[in-house]
Image (cartoon, grey):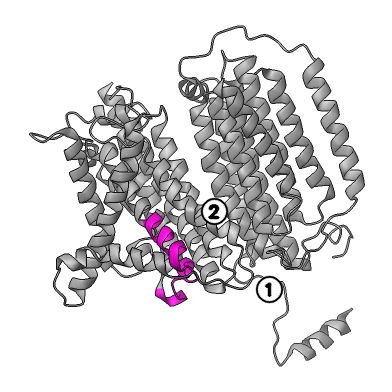
Amino acid sequence: MNLQVFLVLAAALFAAGLYGALSQQSIVMIMMGLELMINAVLVGAVAFWYYAWPQQADGQFLVLLAMVVMAIEMAMGFAATIAIFRARDVDMTDLAADLKG
Amino acid sequence: MAEPAPMWTVLVLPIVLGGLALFAASLNGVLTAVASGRRATLAEWAEPLRASARLLVRQRRTTFRADVVLRRVGIAGIVVAALLASVPTPLGGVAVADLPVGVVWFNAMEILLWALVWLTGWGGNSAFSLVGGYRFLAQALAYELPLMFALTAPPLAADSLRVGAIVQAQQDVWFALWMPLAFLVYLIGIVGVAFWGPLSPPAAADVAGGVTAELSGADRLVFLAGRYLMLAAGAAFAVPLFLGGGQGPLLPAWLWSLLKMAAVLAVLVWLRRFSLVRAERLMSWGWLVLLPVVLLQVLVVGVVVLLRG
Amino acid sequence: MWEVIAFWVLAVLAVASGIAVFRVDSMARATFLLLASFLFVAGEMLVLELHYLGALTVLMMTAEMAIMAVFMIMFMMNPAGLEPMEMVHNKRGALVISVAVFVALTAAALVVPWPERAAPHPSDATHQLGEAIMRDKMLVMMVVGVGLFATMVAATLLATARGRYGEHAAPSRPEPSPHAHAHHHHAGGDR
């Protein structure tokens, strides 16, 4: 095993997440696509730490940061979805695109 | 504690944990019998075995368009999570694997129940069982954070996340004695994880058994066994974490471990006599009382560690 | 040897469950397939002997996905997928773009001359991470803490019905009352 195969795994996860984020209509499903893309970041970070730069903890630290980003994304994403849903009764991006209100 | 674990420990773990779980179930049955005025006969102690046999031969009920896959994942997963959570728990000085991050490992396996209990409730395609699943999540949001901080206190004092090192650090004085609040919050958290006693609204009678509402036959047996196993796993992990592991006079270390585990488990089972706590009240207590208390406890531990140098 | 096998098995499972997230009808299945993908990646971390990060990934993602499932059920009109329906737009475009991105990233991964490992692994990766958090990365962690706190406050404000003006703020929807009609009439007159 080497860095390359881990990066290919990360690329596959990233592409799968990108497909979801681009194609899904529901806000919640789009967030799942984003999460899958961050999953790819986790793989890339640990692979770079292990195979390229183990003398410093930056790769590991990036995993912590990615998790924080995910937590913030989740909290704010759902809060915004609830707010939109309260005001407009929609949970689909296509319906939230107009400038009503 | 640094001895490499022999292979037979893999077989011993399910036996010991299963035995503890059976003890908890029997004790629960006996307490029920005593509460209803019967005498605690040997037959009452053996009741869980008879009940298990009955459940095994009974045919399973099915609900309309149940998500059987997700439900089975939830039910079986609880047993697996309880066993995996106990991997770093030493019996005497021997654990299946004394993982370098044993405490975090236990935490991760215990938190799997967030998903598994909810899946069990969801899979039945029935309102009451789903309500049970939601109740579990609501409770989890209240007890989990205090539980996590309670788990950090012993590693902080022992300067290691390795369970073996935590036991060794208690040679002079058990952690339960000088961090009693962390011990208390830990026990409350475990009661929540196993949704037992006062924290059993996810499986309470007012929602027709909650997550257990639609479970029957072998499914029900495995789910209830998993719940007792999780309670046992939590009680067992308290021993190396707070009660000095296998330390004690005269008796061999493994026997001391076992006795302490059974004692903690008995206390947890006995908590069933208290009435149910509502989720919103638990939320207030969890965030306004337990969390500040356990943070203070961790602060005290930190200061003691610094002063000790 | 076992590491190579574990890597490939976990990698295939992680990608497969990641793709399956967008192919199942049931929201519950989608959410927990995503969790499965994260758990397999946590397994990859354990293969690289990053015990702490592996356990942490299991811990964080399980809690996050369990909460996510609640919102999925709340917002989807067909959460259990009992009546299959399409909830996608521009499927082909999305597929083309993501395949192109995958090819480009894979090419980059294989072509770029990555640096060789210059130093041995630390004896305790968890210890290394802890040192970094408490020394070099202390400032980042503090900023992260503030960011998380701001998120908690902002998310709660956005999500609560009464908004940031407390109990006495106007409700977002007019309440049905016997005077509702007269009220409406009056408002109309003002315009």
Q: Secondary structure at mark 1?
A: loop
The answer to whether residue C16 is above or below residue B93 is: below
Q: In x, y percent, where is residue C171?
A: 68, 73
Are marks 2 and 1 in one subunit? Answer: no
Hey, which residue is sitting farthest front in the picture? Answer: B57
Identify residue type, mark 1.
Pro
Hey, which quadrant is residue A56 in on the image? top right
Magenta span contains residue B200: no
- Say which of B130 and C1 sits in front: C1
What residue is disc 1 on? C171
Alpha carbons under labels 2 and 1: distance apart: 43 Å
Image point 79% across, 37% down: which residue? A15
Hey, which residue is sitting farthest top in the picture? Answer: C118
The residue carrying pointer 2 sits among few (fewer than 14), some (14 to 19) or many (20 or more) residues within 10 Å by Cα, namely some
Secondary structure, magenta segment, majority class: helix
Identify residue type, mark 2.
Val
What residue is disc 2 on? B73
Hey, which residue is sitting farthest bottom in the picture? Answer: C178
Image point 43% across, 36% down: which residue? B104
Can residue B116 be seen in the rendering of this structure?
Answer: yes
Instruction: Locate the N terminus of chain B and report the quarter of the image it occupies.
Output: top left
Image point 66% across, 64% down: which residue? C74
- Say which of B296 and B212 sits in front: B212
The boundaries of the magenta stretch are: B205-227
Q: Secondary structure at mark 2?
A: helix
Image point 13% across, 72% down: which residue? B39
For discs 2 and 1, the disc positioned in front in the rendered view: 2
The residue carrying pointer 1 sits among few (fewer than 14), some (14 to 19) or many (20 or more) residues within 10 Å by Cα, namely few
